[in-house]
Image (tube, coloured by chain):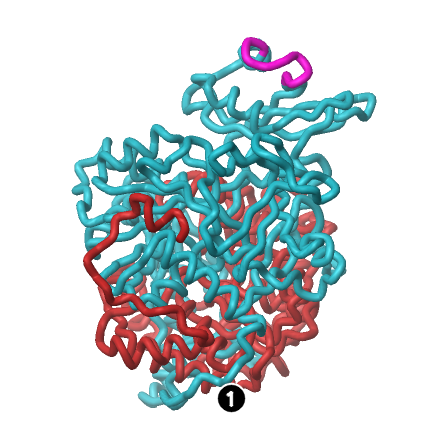
Chain colours: A red, B cyan
């Protein structure tokens, strides 16, 4: 036998170790669920997930994958940290005989495009906060049919010297479809940036506005019932992130990989416009593009109540 | 369609405002519809700035609230979205996929030589390659695990390594389920979080990388954190761990710490440098009976003891190759052996030692220079915290030695003093010609220095180009 048997790896008294059976990874989970039932397989944030529960969740997801048209042999990317959904996804893919393609959650841009294209991934499972990036690169990955999202790890830094946000709440019907909504908003931002002298700004697809390869503004559109909500964050001045990383612990060597490379109006032109100038520029472009009148106005009664409640919620957690 | 839009302009708001305004508008509009409020609410544009630094964080992001306060940073949390909450367009919710599906399913039959997963690994040059790993590769790894570091159903294993990496996939996640253990998942590594988790779950096994063991040792000294005594065994892998750290860690944590060696193509570990009697400093240990390891020269002839060549490996855990890449596969798997790209030798007792990555060897005026040898000298300099040595062309395009150095905190140094220091320990042709000081070195998920990213002309793969890839 190998060295382990004579080595000093501490052994316990337990004799209960399975012999290596010739079974697939998916079948093995089923066997273990039958054998260990309520014994915890996973511990996560103070909760226990038993072998039986794990197997059930995996089964549900396997059925869900089949409903989406994911089949045996298909490649499915997993871009998740160590959360139960990673385990569910991996084993669900094993159970349907698909190929899991897990990769580094810190990959960005071309790295992601290369892996998705090389593997011919049909779907990707990622955290919600990766949606803008994935939406943006989707046209470059013809095989990608589904973006499956989980978890809530959105992380946005706002800074008095750097960021300004543009938000819109409107009836969905205002833009004919989502692609149009993204494109129009992208154009507004590009025009505004050009009015400040950022001549190289361009809008790619559903998400960021970039200068060169770097991000200068991000856009996320979500929907709630009949409404559409737009969230744009634009960098007017350089974003100094040192302080933020004192609050969110990230290993020093990966700091520059947590954020996508970003730039700002000031870095591109030498001048930082103030918020007033940003507002005027946006309003002028908006009115011209859509032929609407925009007037400053207060929150209405229902909105005021909601505002107080939402602020309390945001400050609570 | 409304002709008149409303503007809300809030240039000096804060992080909570950025979240609250759009949510309030949505709620007002939706509530208005049900409460028959007489006020009609127009479509709205909001322009906001903040007067203080802030973080907008999703419900699953860990923010150190106290530290945020100390640094004058506001933290605003997104509420956890329930069903019917805001959903990004054209995406599928994993939660909803699960909710609406049946919990009955029988694993479909597969050929055990079918690919179960593709793991992308970066070569020294070029794009990452997809390593195909099969069910049989995993079964091979389980046999090895059972022999080299057996796991039992009573074990509670700490899952702190990222699962997308082969080391966590093949030595943590899948074996944990296979051997019926309990796995504690840590989604976001920090030394304090890891130590706390180990104590909370009474961990018995820790499988981690050198930097984590070093961090754990540091905080165990500097903070009054209780040290869990439940750890029976630990494994470090990904990069070598200094002997001193192993000894100190074993003492402080009352455990045993062995070092593993493996690659993505070998379904992770194939060798273990077992702590205790079998331990040889700097070695990766003896090959187990489940794997054959030899040292080959350039023509694939086997070399004898103490002769340096390429480490080649054979066994059931060896990958069948790179996805859609027959050329690279044939090259790596020639003559039935997986060519690891690692250079090393075997001593008379059979212990294997790694010296360098084959492609990292620097050739200067016909002489081979081992970057690792230069790095080891640099590491002994008291001001040097971290270092990496690569070959770069000099003015006349001949390859020469360049050292990247991260200094200890608060230290300053002159390149000359570093070179002078090296002169005492190295032949003249091995001395670094260029020295560059850096704040940090680019590293992989397991803490290996990404030398590719240190070379000139490295293309930042995080950038997106206008015309796609």
- Asked whether residue A314 appears in the rendered view, the answer is yes
Q: Is residue B272 above or below residue B22?
A: above
Q: Is residue A117 left or right of residue A245?
A: right
- The one nearer the camera, B440 or A175, is B440
Q: Residue at x 30, y 48 (%)?
A: B194
User: Which residue is rendered at x = 63% and y = 74% of the image?
Assistant: A144
Q: Residue B8, position in %: x, y?
A: 46, 64
How busy is the neighbourhood of tag 1: few (under 14 within 10 Å), some, or many (20 plus)?
few
- Residue B323 image position (x, y, % from top left): 66, 65
Q: Which residues are magenta?
A: B423-431
Quadrant in which residue A86 is drawn = bottom left
Residue located beneath label 1 in the image: A67
Q: Quadrant of residue B279?
A: top left
| Residue B237 among magenta residues | no
Q: Quadrant of residue B252?
A: top left
Q: Chain of mark 1?
A: A
B260 on left or right of B396: left
The correct choice, above or below, for B264 with respect to B20 in the image is above
Q: Position of residue B260 (x, y in %)?
A: 43, 45
In the rendered image, the quadrant that contains the N terminus of chain B is bottom right
Give the SS element for disc 1.
Answer: helix
For the C terminus of chain B, the quadrant is bottom right
């Amino acid at each position: 036998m190998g060295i382990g048997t004579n080595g000093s790896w501490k052994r316990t008294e337990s004799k209960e170790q399975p012999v290596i059976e010739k079974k697939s990874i998916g079948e093995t989970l089923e066997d273990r669920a039958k054998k260990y039932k309520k014994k915890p397989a996973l511990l996560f944030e103070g909760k226990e997930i038993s072998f039986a529960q794990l197997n059930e969740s995996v089964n549900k997801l396997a059925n869900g994958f089949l409903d989406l048209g994911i089949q045996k042999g298909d490649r499915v990317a997993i871009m998740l940290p160590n959360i139960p959904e990673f385990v569910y996804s991996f084993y669900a893919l094993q159970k349907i005989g698909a190929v899991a393609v897990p990769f580094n959650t810190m990959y960005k841009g071309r790295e992601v495009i290369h892996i998705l294209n090389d593997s011919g991934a049909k779907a990707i499972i990622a955290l919600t906060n990766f949606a803008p990036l994935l939406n943006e690169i989707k046209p470059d990955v013809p095989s990608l049919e589904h973006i499956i999202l989980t978890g809530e790890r959105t992380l946005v830094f706002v800074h008095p010297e750097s960021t300004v946000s543009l938000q819109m709440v409107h009836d969905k019907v205002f833009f004919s479809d989502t692609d149009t909504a993204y494109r129009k908003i992208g154009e507004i931002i590009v025009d505004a940036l050009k009015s400040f002298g950022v001549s190289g700004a361009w809008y790619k697809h559903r998400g960021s506005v970039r200068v060169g390869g770097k991000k200068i503004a991000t856009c996320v559109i979500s929907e709630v019932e009949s409404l559409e909500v737009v969230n744009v964050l634009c960098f007017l001045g350089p974003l100094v992130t040192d302080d933020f990383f004192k609050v969110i612990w990230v290993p020093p060597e990966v700091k520059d990989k947590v954020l996508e490379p970003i730039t700002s109006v000031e870095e591109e032109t030498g001048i930082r416009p103030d918020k007033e100038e940003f507002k005027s520029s946006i309003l002028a472009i908006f009115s011209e593009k859509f032929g609407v009148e925009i007037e400053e106005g207060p929150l209405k009664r229902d909105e005021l109540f909601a505002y107080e409640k939402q602020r309390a919620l945001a400050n609570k957690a | 369609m409304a002709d008149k839009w409303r503007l809300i302009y809030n240039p000096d708001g804060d992080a909570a405002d950025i979240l609250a305004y759009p949510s309030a508008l949505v709620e007002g509009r939706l509530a208005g519809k049900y409460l028959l409020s007489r006020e009609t609410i127009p479509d709205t544009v909001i322009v906001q700035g903040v007067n203080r630094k802030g973080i907008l964080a999703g419900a699953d992001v860990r923010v150190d609230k106290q530290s945020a306060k100390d640094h004058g940073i506001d933290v605003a949390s997104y509420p956890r979205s329930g069903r019917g909450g805001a959903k990004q367009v054209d995406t599928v919710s994993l939660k909803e996929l699960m909710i609406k599906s049946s919990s009955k399913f029988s694993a479909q039959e597969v050929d055990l030589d079918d690919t179960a997963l593709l793991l992308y690994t970066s070569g020294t040059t070029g794009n990452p390659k997809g390593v195909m790993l099969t069910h049989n590769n995993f079964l091979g790894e389980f046999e090895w695990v059972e022999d080299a570091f057996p796991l039992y159903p009573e074990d509670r294993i700490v899952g702190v390594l990222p699962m997308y990496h082969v080391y966590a996939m093949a030595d943590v996640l899948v074996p944990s389920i296979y051997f019926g253990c309990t796995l504690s998942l840590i989604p976001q590594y920090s030394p304090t979080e890891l130590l706390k988790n180990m104590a909370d779950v009474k961990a018995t096994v820790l499988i981690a990388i050198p930097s984590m063991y070093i961090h754990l040792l540091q905080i165990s000294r500097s903070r009054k954190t209780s040290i869990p005594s439940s750890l029976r065994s630990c494994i470090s892998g990904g990069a070598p761990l200094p002997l001193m750290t192993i000894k100190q860690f074993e003492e402080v944590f009352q455990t045993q710490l062995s070092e593993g060696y493996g690659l993505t193509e070998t379904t992770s570990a194939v060798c273990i440098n077992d702590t205790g009697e079998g331990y040889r400093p700097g070695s990766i240990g003896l090959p187990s009976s489940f794997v054959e390891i030899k040292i080959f020269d350039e023509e694939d002839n086997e070399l004898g003891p103490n002769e340096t060549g390429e480490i080649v490996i054979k066994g059931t855990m060896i990958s069948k190759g790179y996805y859609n890449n027959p050329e690279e596969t044939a090259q790596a798997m020639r003559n039935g052996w997986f060519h690891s790209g690692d250079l090393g030798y075997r001593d008379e007792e059979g212990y294997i030692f790694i010296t360098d990555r084959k492609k990292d060897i620097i050739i200067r005026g016909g002489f081979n220079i081992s970057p690792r040898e230069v790095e080891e000298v640099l590491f002994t300099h008291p001001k040097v915290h971290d270092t990496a040595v690569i070959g770069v062309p000099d003015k006349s395009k001949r390859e020469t030695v360049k050292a990247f150095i991260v200094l200890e905190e608060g230290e300053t140094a002159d390149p000359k003093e570093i070179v002078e220091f090296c002169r005492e320990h190295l032949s003249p042709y091995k001395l670094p010609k260029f020295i560059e000081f850096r704040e940090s070195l680019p590293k992989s998920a397991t803490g290996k220095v990404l030398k590719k990213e240190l070379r000139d002309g490295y293309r930042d793969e995080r950038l997106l180009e206008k015309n796609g890839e």
